[in-house]
Image (spheres, grey):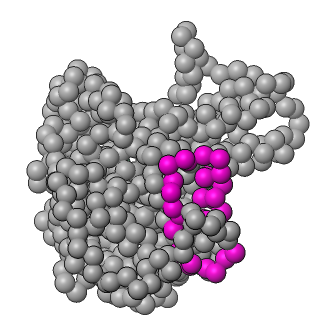
């Protein structure tokens, strides 16, 4: 679904009737849709003819048709929202128009009461292997976490206008678009489109025109907009803003300062919020007006969150500024309950490292003398590209599925705007190309785009004769 109110309506409608939803980001390829449908055994797909982005139309129904072609035997119905009037093929008996389906239905639909632990949704996210994990959240705890953190961290008041720029395809769009603020009774803004079209003033214009008071976005967007200079935001009236948020990756102090000075006019607190798809809700963040903030630190765990930093043996690191694994010692309401259909992988991914003593977040961090947390990065093979979570092995699997590729190693490369960019080392089945290899590079980039979606396309591809390996044959990406 595109970023239209009907996306949230569809999610909450599932919750209301006790159905489990699994939102697939509109930028993912047909393959990703197919894999997620098959893993979950989904019965219904809700989509739109298309979505608007950057002046064009993203053909969503066509991607769904391609995903279902010869696959996804569990699918009974496809519900299609007419968003753009784009031409689509409707298959008789399977495909239904949203507006025809709801015509004449009563406005009131009594909720189906479910147990607190009833699954609310699945959200697939990248991990250390090629196969994304189906993070499963439960009804009551998740909603409690999303609502309470919306109230605490964003200090939500009755007259606020809250805008979280995340797409509903990511966890931030679940917790801080579809669920948390709405459960707290807030007024929210949703925007369907790109931040740079028609120009980089789009976000600031929306803040002005809709009198946004709380604005929540990702460091990658802040950095990209910062590059355009101070004159662009100065054209808009941002005086209604009173609180700014950041999420998805560490925010560098320079971007933090710019956000504070230029967007917040020096008067808005910034909440740098650390959390994950798995945690369901914000875990480490300042409480505005209470916690003293520091540019680059997500500050301190929220009340009830028992975070700590441990060494290789699982012993708490007590010395200030010493790094270690970021772990959580006690359960919290919105934590993931399992990985869909693979509880063993759930246990081994999150609990095995320290024999069940802690939830292992997968990040390394250190804590300073004031008790503030500084997130240093992932300890696994997960990349954060523009705040989007991608698995290096997922991209490698996509590359080696191409007939001309023998082996691939994917690593993150520091990028001023995106935080990290995707860099692939590729060994071909034939000899290493000499001279101009741009045609092959383009072919492989598009191939990955087709397999996984445009966000996973490597920015750079370098051809190699071989890759560094351990004695057991594992690729040593760090080298
Ligand atoms: C919400 C989200 C989770 C990973 C996480 C970190 C990184 C997220 C911050 C951050 C530093 C932050 N969910 N991360 N927020 N790092 N400061 N404020 O992003 O499942 O997609 O990713 O993102 O590495 O483990 S996610």
Q: Quadrant of the C terminus?
A: top right
Is 82 contained in the magenta span?
yes
Is 436 contained in the magenta span?
no
Is 362 placed left or right of 77 in the picture?
A: left
Q: Indicate the position of residue 210 as horizontal and vertical percent values.
A: 39, 88
Numbered-mark total: 0
Instruction: Identify the residue shown where x is 45% and y is 33%.
Output: 128
Instruction: Identify the residue shown where x is 37% and y is 50%.
Output: 122
Instruction: Identify the residue shown where x is 49% and y is 88%.
Output: 235
- Viewer-nearest residue: 286 or 34: 34
Span colored in magenta:
60-87
Q: Is 59 above or below relative to 447? A: below
Q: Indicate the position of residue 165 as horizontal and vertical percent values.
A: 42, 70
- Viewer-nearest residue: 443 or 123: 123
Instruction: Identify the residue shown where x is 43% and y is 46%.
Output: 40
Is 320 placed left or right of 350 in the picture?
A: left
């Amino acid at each position: 679904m595109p970023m239209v109110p009907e996306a949230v309506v569809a999610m909450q409608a599932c919750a209301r009737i006790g159905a489990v939803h699994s939102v697939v980001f509109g930028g993912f390829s047909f393959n990703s849709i197919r894999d997620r449908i098959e893993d979950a055994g989904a019965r219904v797909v809700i989509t739109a003819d298309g979505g608007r982005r950057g002046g064009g139309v993203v053909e969503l129904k066509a991607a769904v048709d391609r995903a279902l072609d010869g696959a996804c035997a569990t699918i009974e119905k496809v519900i299609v929202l007419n968003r753009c009037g784009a031409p689509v093929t409707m298959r008789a008996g399977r495909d239904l128009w949203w507006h025809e389906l709801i015509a004449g239905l009563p406005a009131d639909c009594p909720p189906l009461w479910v147990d607190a632990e009833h699954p609310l949704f699945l959200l697939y996210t990248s991990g250390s292997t090629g196969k994304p994990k189906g993070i499963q959240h439960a009804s009551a705890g998740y909603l409690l976490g999303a609502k309470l953190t919306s109230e605490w961290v964003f200090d939500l008041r009755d007259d606020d206008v809250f805008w979280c720029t995340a797409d509903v395809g990511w966890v931030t769009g679940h917790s801080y678009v579809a669920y948390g603020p709405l459960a707290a009774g807030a007024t929210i803004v949703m925007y369907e489109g790109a931040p740079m079209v028609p120009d980089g003033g789009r976000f600031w214009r929306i803040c002005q025109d809709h009198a946004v008071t709380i604005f929540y976005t990702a460091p990658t967007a802040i950095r990209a907009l910062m590059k355009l200079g101070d004159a662009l935001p100065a054209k808009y009236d941002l005086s209604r803003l009173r609180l700014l948020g950041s999420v998805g990756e560490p925010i560098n102090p320079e971007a933090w300062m710019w956000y504070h000075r230029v967007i917040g006019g020096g008067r808005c607190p910034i909440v740098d919020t650390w959390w994950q798809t798995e945690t369901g809700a914000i875990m480490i963040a300042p409480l505005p007006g209470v916690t003293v903030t520091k540019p680059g630190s997500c500050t301190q765990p929220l009340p009830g969150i028992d975070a700590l930093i441990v060494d290789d043996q699982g012993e708490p690191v007590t010395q200030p500024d010493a790094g270690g694994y970021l772990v959580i010692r006690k359960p919290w309401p919105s934590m993931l309950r399992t990985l869909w259909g693979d509880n063993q992988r759930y246990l081994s991914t999150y609990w095995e490292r320290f024999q069940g003593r802690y939830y292992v977040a997968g990040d390394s961090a250190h804590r300073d003398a004031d008790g503030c947390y500084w997130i240093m990065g992932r300890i696994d093979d997960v990349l954060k590209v523009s705040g989007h979570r991608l698995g290096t092995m997922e991209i490698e699997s996509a590359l080696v599925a191409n007939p001309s590729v023998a082996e691939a190693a994917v690593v993150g490369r520091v990028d001023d705007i995106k935080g990290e960019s995707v860099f692939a080392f590729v060994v071909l089945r034939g000899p290493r190309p000499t001279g101009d290899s741009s045609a092959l590079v383009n072919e492989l980039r598009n191939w990955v785009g087709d397999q996984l979606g445009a966000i996973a396309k490597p920015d750079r591809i370098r051809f190699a004769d071989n890759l560094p390996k351990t004695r057991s044959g594992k690729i040593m990406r760090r080298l």
